[in-house]
Image (cartoon, rainbow, N blue to C red):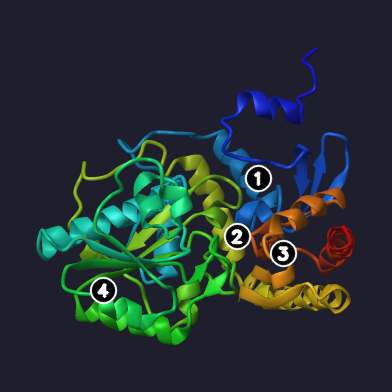
Amino acid sequence: MQPKTSRELFDKVILPVYAPAQFIPVKGQGSRVWDQDGEEYIDFAGGIAVNALGHCHPRLVKALHEQSEKLWHVSNVFTNEPALNLAQKLIDNTFADRVFFANSGAEANEAAFKLARYYAIHKRNPYKTKIITFYQSFHGRTFFTVSVGGQAKYSDGFGPKPADIIHVPFNDLNAVKAVMDDHTCAVVLEPVQGEGGLTSATPEFLQGVRELCNEHQALLVFDEVQCGMGRTGSLYTYQQYNIKPDILTSAKALGGGFPISAMLTTNEIASVMHPGVHGTTYGGNPLACAVGCEAFDIINSPEVLDGVQKRRALFIEKLEEINDQFKLFREYRGKGLLLGAELQPKFHNKARDFLNVATEFKVMILNAGPNVLRFTPSLIISDDEIKEGMLRFAKAVEKVVNA
């Protein structure tokens, strides 16, 4: 008999780039998770905004099972029905005319940044390569995407970085104006910065950036890997700002837990591409797209989207009850169920402590930097689960505060 897999095995066999919790989840259903010992946890983390419909949603399980008995993989040498169906759903419900599928947010962003430069070089001039992006942003872990990301701790130490990438403060339109010129090929941003602390773009800022891009014939690229797919209460967050990007990336919740990502763009921008310019082996595979189709249909419904703000309000109500007792939070950030609670200065650099202790009380949360607690639960989590999870979290808070 094979011995029980232990947490200690992680430290022996996995590359040491993560520091996971001490328990090992083995089963999930809805917004609850069970570990190896049968202990039950309430999940406020949602796989970092991936499990938008909770764990093992029956319709997703059914879609995966049915597709698993038909066709798993054919590569990009052939197309397949689920990929075409999901692409059509995305096009019908967004600004886009064309879709490129990949497997992760980083891959979707890599494709977006390559497309932006390729379009500018071939449609404008070979020197139009500058990318303007923002401090505290996060766009993935490939060398290009981590360089566009605005957190040096993730990109330093790997040698020379891709050139012609400029970082400026987020929500500072004057800073963008100061570096914007006719050599700019794209401005890249998250409408709500995820890893950077759940900071939302202001309407005035996004409108101004859109106008600057129009003026300088630059593309506006929205990374909606974390804030898209219903997370903030609309299918995509850009739809709340009354502007349209030229390129948008989507991942995380797009597959409801199954790895898939997409880059969306227009016919005009897509027109520069041709076979061989870019590609991926697994992108658009039938398994992922079949699950993605089902997840899309469930999320893109009034029942789910309209419930996001109601659930956010309940989260904040319960966080305020904790705050009344412990004076823990300074402000609430983000949109919808991409919810951040910024810690008071006296608790700065302790966000990870709250995360770790929360697991002792059987609730799973996240942090977004050292000073912000992050909650990205299922979009269909029940009120009772929110209340029960918050009771558990309150006990964790008490332990940390009184330590």
Mark on residue 62?
Answer: 1
Real-space Cα separation, disc 3 to disc 1, in angstroms: 18 Å
Choose mark 3 or mark 4, whichever is in front. 4
Q: Alpha-carbon distance for marks 1 and 2?
A: 37 Å
The amino acid at mark 1 is Lys
Q: Which of labels 1 and 2 is toward the front?
A: 2
Quadrant in the rendering for residue 216: bottom left
Q: Earlier in the sequence, mark 1 or mark 4?
A: 1
Q: Secondary structure at mark 1?
A: helix
Distance between the alpha carbons at the discs numbered 1 and 4: 50 Å
Label 3 crowd bin: few (<14), some (14–19), many (20+), radius 10 Å: some
In percent of the image, x 55 and y 60: which residue is there?
Answer: 195
Viewer-nearest residue: 252 or 160: 160
Figure check: 29 above or below 305: above
* Residue for point 80% across, 22% down: 4
Which residue is label 4 attached to? 179
Identify the mark nearer the N-term, 1 or 2: 1
Q: Which numbered tag is attached to residue 380?
A: 3
Q: Amino acid at mark 4?
A: Val
The disc, 3 or 1, on the residue closer to the chain's N-terminal end is 1
Q: Is residue 158 above or below residue 393?
A: above
Residue 335 is at least partly visible in this image = no
